[in-house]
Image (cartoon, rainbow, N blue to C red):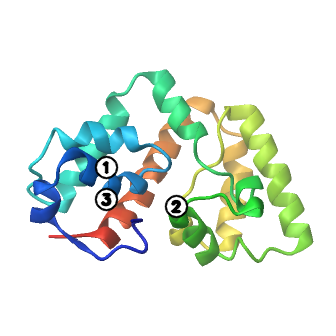
Amino acid sequence: MTALTATRLDLAALNAMDRDAFVAAVGPTFENASWIAQAAWSRRPFASVDALHAAMLDVVRQAPEERRLAFLRGHPELAGREAQAGTMTAESTGEQSSAGLDALSREELDEMQHLNRVYRERHGFPFIIAVRRHSRQQIFEALRARAAGSTDVERRTALEQIGLITRGRIDALVGG
């Protein structure tokens, strides 16, 4: 079951799930990081969808720096090799498609791949942005600007963007 294809879950039902069911239900909302849902499960019951999302974000924030960095590195590049190979999660595929990143011209794709490489070489993880909140042009502009920024700022910005991405995924999955 994935966040974009699942029937909406009732919060009370989610609170009543055993760990495995909970992780299967909400784990995909945080890209390839079921450890986040595993740790958040022990914080049940959640009074609201806000509380669920906050608990999951807290797990990330409280993780050791190396684990947070590994989490960031586990995200796919925009229109990158995972997209080309069709190996992204269903959530990421839908999000990138919504911004038209699956329909780039050859020139746009070349520029995206170049900018992805520059960003990753500078910061050590892929560029992360809540694509559903941006146009294709805005994504390119943000990638150009953020590639030149401070890595410390980029780590914070990436986590903020993940908060936006995952909130949308959780809202699509869980009803109050």
Which residue shows up at 74% across the image and 33% down it? 122
Q: What element carries label 1?
A: helix
Q: Evaluate if marks 2 and 3 touch, with contact meaning CB atoms under 8 Å apart.
A: no
Residue 164: quadrant of the picture: bottom left
Identify residue for label 1. 23
Q: In this view, does 67 lie to the left or right of 152?
A: left
Q: What element carries label 2?
A: loop
Identify residue for label 3. 25
Which residue shows up at 31% across the image and 45% down it? 37
> Residue 109 appears at what percent x and percent y?
84, 65
Q: In this view, does 102 lie to the left or right of 131?
A: right
Q: How far apart are marks 3 and 1 (CA)?
A: 5 Å
Disc 3 residue type?
A: Ala
Residue in the foreground of this view, choosing between 139 and 90? 90
Identify residue for label 2. 130
Q: In this view, does 130 lie to the left or right of 122?
A: left
Q: Can residue 169 be seen in this view?
A: yes
Residue in the foreground of this view, choosing between 166 and 3? 3
Q: Is residue 79 visible?
A: no
Give the mark, 2 or 3, whose residue is nearer the N terminus. Answer: 3
Residue 64: quadrant of the picture: top left
Report crowding for label 2: few under 14, some 14 to 19, many 20 or more residues within 10 A (C-alpha). some
Q: Is residue 72 above or below residue 101?
A: above
Q: Is residue 160 above or below residue 90?
A: above
> Residue 10 appears at what percent x and percent y?
16, 70
Q: In this view, does 102 lie above or below 120?
A: below
Q: How far apart are marks 1 and 2 (CA)?
A: 23 Å
Q: Evaluate if marks 3 and 1 touch, with contact meaning CB atoms under 8 Å apart.
A: yes
> Residue 60 appears at what percent x and percent y?
37, 36
